[in-house]
Image: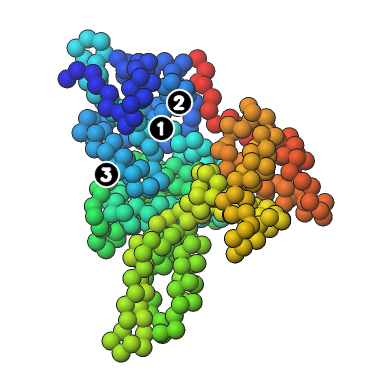
Amino acid sequence: MSFQITAAAPEHPGLLLELPWQVPLEEWPAEQLVALPRGISRHVVRFARAGGEVVAVKEVGEFNAVREYGLLRDLHRLGVPAVEPVAVVTGRTDGGDEALEPVLITHHLKGSMPYRAMFETTMRPSTVSRLLDALAVLLVRLHLVGFAWGDCSLSNTLFRRDAGAYAAYLVDAETGQLQPQLSDGQRAYDIEIARVNVAGELMDLEAGGSLHPSVDPISFGDALAARYGDLWHELTRASVYSRNFRHKIDDRIRRLNELGFDVAEMQIQHSPDGAKVTILPKAVDAGHHQRQLLRLTGLDAEENQARSLLNDLETYTAHQDDFEPGDPLSASREVVAHRWVREVFRPTVRLVPKELRARMDTAQLYHEILEHRWYLSEQEKGDVGLERTVDDYVRNVLVKIPDPVATLDD
């Protein structure tokens, strides 16, 4: 078979041609690689620069590479948190007659970490719980779109900071299947695999001295399954109310919004005697605050980051004299939101030295500045302002955070 690059976007093949495809991935020269933490994998995986971008390159058999590429594209189209596919490269040779394994290429997920890199310093039990919460939310979101993972684990997940919590992303879809709808048995199978895998991975950390002594691997594996069950129940349960039920629907929607989910459709059924009404969310979609922030400002953020930024926007809006809810002559919420982006968000981010901004994504950076402002203001019993906050945050916090992308030394 001749050398071939199958790419998700027209510009990708040109960016990838500069990489040394005639060399086994394990032997790629250091100047092509980027020093980023890697998780455990069944395959050889490397991070490389391609046209100014950082990509993850994984050697894998052609059938599995093409299949996983297609599944990742489907998940990306469905809006499920997963690494974004770039291309599949087949027909590689060493320049002679020796065939080399095909590769699957994905975008590096900026700001993400594999779980082992996060446990290099012993995590507190509460932080471990937040990681497992993020994994439970990811598993629910996958099941809602009909994706059976088949190998849910910490190793097959990447984590990004999300305003004090974490967001989980699927990084390995090799064992997955996408179907119109999953049965209860398929979901139960995935949950059991997740429970066993997570418990085993935590035991491995325990054996290596990287796990907090109060964290029991078995209990935390069980807690993941319980968290998944609670979340799935809240998202899909039917609620039975008396006829005077309008405020109950509003309450239910608000609870789902607080979990980060939107209600796309509600099914309402009246009982035969007309005394009770059953409410069932027909379709739920994650990212309620993400979409609200994107709609108002054009900013793309994780769910909890979006919640934090929206709270700051609400505070700003409350101090605008030309905004009055319900008044058709006042400035619209969208106008005020774009004013906040122009007058508050962007100027604040630009106060951070350009060379330091890349140490985390912009939404997380702004959230941390807000948190630091609250901390300093509490200390001084009064608002310290954003300029002073940014200066203190940069000098005492940001400079101590390592650059996530550094080229490997020779």
Which residue is under mark 1?
107
Q: Residues within 10 Å of mark 1 (few under 14, many from 20)?
A: some
Q: CA distance from mark 3 to mark 2?
A: 27 Å
Measuring from the top left, give residue 350's x and y in whole percent.
66, 34
Mark 3 and mark 1: span between their CA atoms?
Answer: 20 Å
Q: Is residue 323 left or right of residue 245?
A: right
Protein image colouring: rainbow
Q: Residue at x 19, y 12 (%)?
A: 97
Cβ–Cβ under 8 Å for marks 3 and 2: no
Q: Nearer the viewer, residue 398 or 382?
A: 382
- Amino acid tagged 3: Thr
Instruction: Give left or right: position of 40 versus 310.
Output: left
Task: Tell me if mark 3 has few (under 14), some (14-19) or many (20+) residues whose alpha carbon lies within 10 angstroms of its own.
Answer: few
Q: Amino acid at mark 1?
A: His
Q: Residues within 10 Å of mark 2 (few under 14, many from 20)?
A: few
Q: Earlier in the sequence, mark 3 or mark 2?
A: 2
Whether tag 1 and tag 2 are in contact, CB under 8 A, the answer is yes
Q: Is residue 123 visible?
A: no
Expressed as whole percent of the image width and height from the top left, the position of residue 216 reads: 48, 56
Instruction: State how far apart marks 1 and 2 are (Cα).
Output: 8 Å
Q: Which mark is residue 150?
A: none
Residue 121 seen from this side: yes
* Residue at the disc numbered 3: 175
Looking at this view, name the residue that lies furthest to the front.
Answer: 329
